[in-house]
Amino acid sequence: MQPAETGRCPTCKRWGGVREHAGDGATVLPDPQRLRGPCVEGPWHGSLRGPRNACGQWVCWLQDGHAPAPDKDA
């Protein structure tokens, strides 16, 4: 899987596509088979957005409670 760049739609809280966070807690991995997802309640609401799309109302998905808890043994 190709990691998504920070500030792009797949790393935004408002993106409704399929993604997961990598084990490092700082990397977002969009599903390579479904790279486009709808904007949800953002400026592009309802339109499909891909991994290169961005906007001025980006909200970090990982800082919204989706990041894994830090490993206490690390």
Image: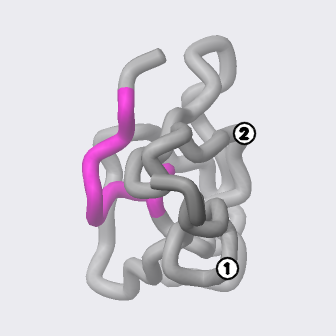
Of residues 32 and 56, the one drawn nearer to the viewer in this rendering: 32
Instruction: Establish if 65 lies above or below 70.
Output: below
Q: Quadrant of residue 60?
A: bottom left
Above or below 24: residue 47: below
**Residue 34 as seen in the image, left or right of residue 42:** right
Mark 1 vs 2, N-terminal side: 2
- Displayed quadrant of residue 26: bottom left
Taken as a whole, is the magenta stretch helix, strand or loop? loop
Q: Quadrant of residue 23?
A: top right
Disc 2 crowd rating (10 Å Cα; few below 14, some 14-19, many 20+) is some
Q: Amino acid at mark 2?
A: Val
Name the residue tied to disc 1. 65
Whether 36 is among the magenta residues is no
Q: Please, what is the three-letter code of the amino acid marked with disc 1?
A: Gly
From the viewer's perspective, is residue 64 above or below residue 11? below
Residue 19: image tag: none
From the viewer's perspective, tell me whether residue 24 is left or right of residue 55. Answer: right
Write down the residue under mark 2.
18
At 28% from the left edge and 83% from the top edge, which residue is drawn?
A: 56
Q: Which residues are magenta?
A: 3-11
Q: Could you say which is closer to the camera, residue 53 or residue 33?
A: 33
Q: Secondary structure at mark 2?
A: loop
Q: Residue at x 45, y 53 (%)?
A: 74
